[in-house]
Image: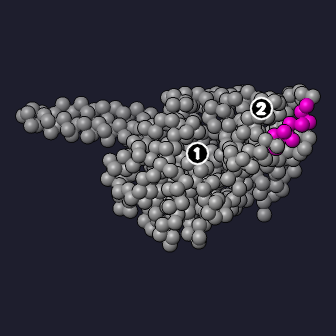
Amino acid sequence: MAQQLSPVSGGRQDSAAPVDSAQSAPAPKCPWYAFATPTIGRAVRHASRLLHHGGSALPGKVVERIDPGFLARTLSSLPYGVVLVSGTNGKTTTTRMVASMLSDMGLRVFTNPTGSNFTRGVVSSLLTQVSTFGHLHADIAVLELDEAYAVHFVRQVRPRYALLLNVMRDQLDRFGEIDNTARLLAHVARATTGTVVLNREDPRIARLASEVQPGVQVRYFGLSQALRSYFPSDDDMHNTDMQAAEVQTAEAQAVAVQAAGAQPTGAGSSTATATATSSATYNPDCLNADVTLTHVGDHEATYRITDHDIATSVKLEGVYNLFNAAAAATVVRAVTADTPQGVASDDDLIASLSRVTPAFGRGETISVGGTPVELLLVKNPMGFRLSLASFPPAGHDTMIIINDEYADGRDMSWLWDVDFTGLRGTGVAAVSGTRAWDMALRLEYDQVPVSHVDTDLEQAVADFVAADPITPKRIYCTYTAMLRTRAKLSHITDVTDAGVGR
């Protein structure tokens, strides 16, 4: 049975510990009309849903315009402050895990559950939870923030806890080079007042320990050596691709040189060796992890916590979410350590973890006429690769939907960094989205047969789920494609209302 935690005003009991500025600084001043802010925001939300505009961020955008202090003012009253979750992959599911586990520990948790991770999305979520006069009945907030918008958020509210997951080549048209994404997350690390939790397996994230303020605690989550090949960092993946390209170049050069009767120079192979050497300079084992993932299986995993291995079954989908669970458990340990009852027991943590269900659109399964239709969000090479590796295509019909709206990232060249050869045996039943033909071309290069291509997303989804109703379905989709797919499915079957419209 999980211990019940009672909130204590002021959070930490140690007077020398850092204090969340959201508590220590005066709350932002209220404009004279602040009493009407929640009512106005809810009216906008209601009108938006009636007009089927759907977006979960519109009410927040309006409130940010009319009452800029609403966000900071509302969150300033939370006894345990804010847990901010950011990084390239896994934010939504990890946020769900942390919120669910803290709820199991007895805390009242506010969170933004739909993956609308801009500041206006957080404000929109607040509007559904605050009282008529703007009071939030919660002890702690667990918030997912986009890497760029996390910087805007911490200028308004300094989080007490930060969980920084990873840095991948994602939406380069927005963030530029990968090191710039790391710099964005460095702002979060510097602004955090209590504990920063870092992925020790990602060198760019682990190095953010040097950014935290004096007196702020740093914790890590990690992998056993045996599992690192299953969860390569961005550098590992990028260097592997470069090495493969260099080997192919070297082989081609060797054939050409031998045909000319000369000896190969070996230039290509030496470049590959140099690349491999440069990626091996970082050693994660020099950092002690609070929670380490040591074994993965089919809906089961083993975690090492304080030198104690605990095996558990999980409801989460995808091997990558088993690693995200180690991150979630680490930050939950940090939060509960700051409560009067002390850190949650290892058994309570893992038992709570075993009950977490997939997040909105992240391995979520929707039943259509008794046939399971699984939605899998993909938005960068690593995420897509891990999804394909986690879900063998045999026994399923597969659909891929690629959009290039702002929230997806305009640059879809990253699709060429994904290996689709695992789909050759079953093929892809349907491809859709604004970049359907680009996706179809990419599959053709990997010799994956495609049965149907249709840029009309809604019609393509309807046709896909109606065809061969006995076979389970799996849809890989970008963010806006996932929203539209859920909306279309809601007209066919019962779909949980996640607050983003239908």
- The majority secondary structure of the magenta stretch comes to helix
Q: Which residue is depicted at the point 63% across and 54% down?
A: 487
Where on the picture, by quarter, is residue 141? top right
In the rendered image, which quarter is residue 118 located in? top right
Residue furthest to the left in view is 261
The residue depicted at 73 percent of the width and 54 percent of the height is 100
The label on residue 64 is 2
Picture coordinates of residue 29, whole percent (x, y): 89, 27
Color scheme of the displayed model: one colour
- Please say if 151 is above or below 446: above
Residue at 36% in and 46% down:
441
Whole-percent x, y for residue 137 in the image: 87, 47
State whether residue 402 is above or below residue 171: below
- Seen at 47% across and 69% down, the residue is 468
The answer to if 38 sits in the magenta stretch is yes
Residue stretch in magenta: 33-42
Residue 58 percent location from the top left of the image: 72, 39
Q: Which residue is mark 1?
A: 480
User: Can you say whether 144 is above or below 391 in the image?
Assistant: above
Query: Which disc number belongs to residue 457?
Result: none
Marks 2 & 1, CB-CB < 8 Å contact = no
Residue 95: in sight, yes or no? no
Residue 118 placement, left or right of 70: left
Give the residue type at disc 2: Glu
- As drawn, is 74 to the left or to the right of 434? right
Query: Callout 2 environment at 10 Å: few (<14), some (14 to 19), or many (20+)?
Result: some
Residue placed most toward the observer, 53 or 26:
53
- Which is nearer the eye, 276 or 315? 315
